[in-house]
Image (tube, rainbow, N blue to C red):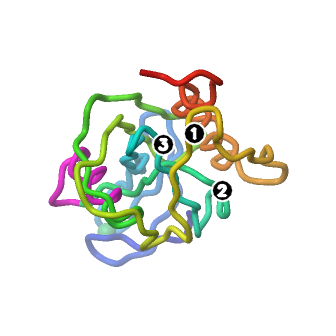
Amino acid sequence: MTAQHCSRCGSRMVPAIIAERQREQCPACGFISYRNPAPVAMAVIEHEGKLVLIRRRDAPLAGYWAPPAGYVEIGESVAGAAIREAREESGLEIVLDELAGVYSQADVEVLIVAYRAHAVGGSLVAGDDASEAALFACGQLPQQPPVAAGTATDAWLQQVILDLTAPWRQAEAVT
Ligand SMILES: [Zn+2]
């Protein structure tokens, strides 16, 4: 995260304490680099009475099952990103039902906005950065080992997924 170049004039940025925080500043033009968590949209999708999960191809939590999610891009809303990621990773067209939660942690560089949603079209097929896509009945979600040697983001993301899928891990069906 150091030795960046100024996005305004191209000079080498240098560390600086500004407003009591460690930041980087351009010695030539004074530009200050503010670092902010990147927003990620996630869709917890019900389809045919089951939960849609994709198997993540990339870190964090590569190889783990998780709801479709991805970075919000300029030019779309957070809700729009959730719908797009669901389409790209699971093949399903979805409608968002409600905000499920907003998750952030001081030592993690993303911020997750999660929605509950249901499928209204498309067909289940893994795509983009998902290696598999599948439906899981309530009480039959895949058992996933705790993150042993991952980063803070891995452990945090696993906890977010556990929290969001908690209603689906109970024995009785949720209505
Ligand atoms: Zn500069």
**Between marks 3 and 2, how big is the CA–CA gap?**
15 Å
**Crowdedness near tag 1: few (<14), some (14–19) or many (≥20) residues, C-alpha within 10 Å:** some
The answer to which of marks 1 and 3 sits earlier in the sequence is: 3
Quadrant field for ligand 1: bottom left
Q: Residue 142's x, y, as percent?
A: 68, 47
Q: What residue is at 55 percent from the left and 33 percent from the top? A: 165
Q: Is residue 119 left or right of residue 159?
A: left
The residue carrying mark 2 is 64
Q: Residue 71's x, y, as percent?
A: 37, 57
Q: Residue 42's x, y, as percent?
A: 40, 46
Query: From the image, which quarter does the N terminus lie in?
Result: bottom right
Q: Is residue 81 magenta?
A: yes
Q: Is residue 26 above or below residue 114?
A: below
Provide the residue span drawn in magenta. 74-86
Q: Amino acid at mark 1?
A: Ile
Q: Is residue 106 left or right of residue 39?
A: right
Q: Amino acid at mark 2?
A: Tyr
The answer to which of marks 3 and 2 sits earlier in the sequence is: 3
Q: Nearer the viewer, residue 29 or 155?
A: 155
The kind of secondary structure the magenta stretch mainly shows is helix
Q: What residue is at 23 percent from the left and 49 percent from the top? A: 120
Label 1 vs label 3, nearer the camera: 3
The residue carrying mark 3 is 51
Indicate if the residue with disc 1 has its beta carbon within 8 Å of ligand 1: no
The residue carrying mark 1 is 161
Q: Is residue 32 left or right of residue 95?
A: right
